[in-house]
Amino acid sequence: MKSLVGKLDVLSVFIAWLLLIAFFLALGYVKFFSPPESSASHLIYIFGAFFGAVVVHIVLAFFNRCPHCNKCLTVQWFKSPHPASSGDWSKVVWHWFSGSIVCIHCGNMVNTNGL
């Protein structure tokens, strides 16, 4: 179950990133190529989906915790990462499906396969 929560959490981050890129691309398209009287409702839908993905990430991040220090694995807040970690929270998200990550809070290895 923990493995599924972690995967859904990371997928929600990826979806939010993709929706944010899509929003700015659509915004640029509307600004430069659409007629002035055209509807921009698709921007509201894309931003709403982005907001929904961020809310899902926030909720799931509280259940996706390091087994060693019990802190959220994909939330860094304002502290700098542990020196033993490979980077910030975006590195954790990016390397999640590799099978193991280094906790940004305590520096311990975390198995992301749930085995």
Image (cartoon, rainbow, N blue to C red):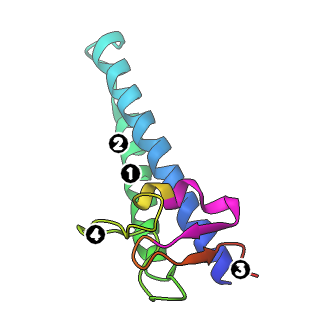
Residue placed farthest to the front in the image?
84
Q: Check whether the beta carbons of the residues at disc 4 and disc 1 lie within 8 A of each other.
A: no
| Amino acid type for the residue under numbered disc 1 | Gly
Please give the residue where the numbered disc 2 appears in the rendered image.
44
> Residue 31, labelled with which disc?
none
| Tag 3: amino acid | Gly
Find the magenta span and give its range: 92-103
Q: Residue at x 45, y 51 (%)?
A: 16
Q: In the rendered view, would you say 29 is above or below 50?
A: above
Image x and y of residue 27, in percent = 33, 27
Residue 64, given in percent of the width and then of the height, sits at: 52, 79
Give the crowd class for mark 1: few <14, some 14-19, many >=20 residues within 10 Å: some
Instruction: Mark 2 or mark 3: name the one nearer the start of the chain.
Output: 2
The reply to whether the magenta stretch includes residue 75 is no
| CA separation in Å, label 1 and label 2 | 6 Å
**What residue do we see at 42% from left, 57% from top?**
87
| Disc assigned to residue 77 | 4
> Between disc 4 and disc 1, whose residue precedes?
1
How far apart are labels 3 and 4 at the CA level? Answer: 25 Å
Task: Give amino acid for label 2.
Answer: Ile
Relative to residue 87, is residue 37 drawn left or right? left
Which quadrant is the C terminus positioned in? bottom right
Q: Which mark is residue 48?
A: 1
Please name the residue that numbered disc 3 is placed on: 114
